[in-house]
Amino acid sequence: MYHSPLFKKMKTRLYQVFAILILLGCSDDGPSLSESFLKIYDNSNFDLSYHPIDVVETIDGFIILSGTELTNTDFQGVQLIKTDEEGNFLSQTSLDNYVAPVGEVYMLDSISYFFAMNPTTLQAVLIGVNPQLEVTVESGIGGIDYPLASALTSSNELLLLSYDPLNLTSEISLIGLDGSFVGGASYTIGAGSDVEAQIIDHYLQRNEQPLPFFCGELSAGNYYFNGFYNFSFSMVFTDFSASPSGVLQGQSTDAGVRAALPLSGNNFAIAGYQFDENFQLSSTGLDPAGIASSVDLYPGDMAELKPYTPSKVISYSSGSGNYTVFAAETKGRQIILYFYDTSSGEVAGVRQIGFLNPYTFASIKTSSDNSLTVLGTTFVADRFERIVLNKLSASEIDDILK
């Protein structure tokens, strides 16, 4: 039977991937398969592309939230994948009534929550699914359009960053688990300014410079978001008053913050950017009640990182100490994790994820067994994009930190 050169090349690459996965799983010196794994999720439609967004641990495995291509709209559709505790594929479902899924995903009382958008009204929708991927919460949030980022608060409410195209404002809102509006505030993007086209491009993944929307909680009643404010893309601090509490100003969309993690006091771990250059600060002081410029934070370029790389910052603790983990992509198309010792601020270890094929980064989470779960994509045969889930066990991370 004749096989084309493309088929032969793809087949060879797949054999290489499977061989390495088998070696990783069978090594006597490494963690067992139940502690650590790397899984690539295939699909019969070779040309379909995916946009993994986040992963959440459930009571019996993991749920992956992903965007996927639709035939009737340019917006990303909503796809959910369920795996067992070892990352083995169990099932998947698509939510055909919604588009533009927004991370993160949060599990509370066995229900995994995330936001998406109604494609007709552009209204934000809170969705909750049980471990079997059955929808148990489906609530449109009146008056809130264009959902952009979310976070979980200490009171188990959801913080939602969105954009109001009528009033030209960025909105930060507290949302109950039933989809009710609890409180919030709106802040101008600048008189006469219109960023709707940029936000649409952000949803449609039309450029190589994604806008790093995020939000979070500093303390009860005090929050922050990264978004459009006063003619620039800035990190804004708020207690829901009429004006922001403080602002770390960006430089249009050319310089600013990609990810932030509050530490003790007014210290933050910051992943930032200046045009196509990237930097990381394991700890820097920010005044939530003052005005400053992100340009002044720039210490120099991390040449290893890809321009405009997606980035995340999380905390991690082990028997050897407390760490801040920065995740990003390299110019060599690997996912890279930097472990900073929170006491010294120095790099305690580095881990690259990726071999043979290009890898992209989407999300990183700490699991209940103190492992790290990294979500992204890889390209099989250099062409077919597939979701990849890599779990690094606690013992594997200890080896990185030695």
Image: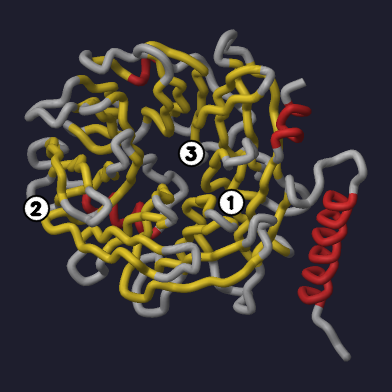
Q: Residues within 10 Å of mark 2 (few under 14, many from 20)?
A: few
Q: Residue at x 48, y 39 (%)?
A: 308
Earlier sequence position, callout 1 versus callout 2: 2
The amino acid type, in three-letter code, at marker 3 is Tyr
- Cα distance in 3D space between marks 3 and 1: 16 Å
The amino acid type, in three-letter code, at marker 2 is Leu
Q: Residues within 10 Å of mark 3 (few under 14, many from 20)?
A: many
The residue furthest top is: 344
Mark number displayed over residue 376: 1
Pick whichever, 189 or 132, lies toward us.
132
The residue furthest bottom is: 1
Q: Image check: 104 left or right of 310? A: left
Name the element at disc 3: loop
Mark number displayed over residue 308: 3
Q: Is residue 23 visible?
A: yes
Q: Residues within 10 Å of mark 1 (few under 14, many from 20)?
A: many
Residue that carries the numbered disc 2 in the rendered image = 166
Write down the quadrant of residue 139 in the picture: bottom left
Q: Residue at x 33, y 14 (%)?
A: 286
- Cα distance in 3D space between marks 1 and 2: 35 Å
Q: Residue at x 37, y 59 (%)?
A: 101
> Do tag 3 and tag 2 residues touch (Cβ < 8 Å)?
no
The amino acid type, in three-letter code, at marker 1 is Gly
Q: Quadrant of the N terminus?
A: bottom right
Earlier sequence position, callout 3 versus callout 2: 2
Earlier sequence position, callout 3 versus callout 1: 3
Name the element at disc 2: loop
Q: Quadrant of the C terminus?
A: top right
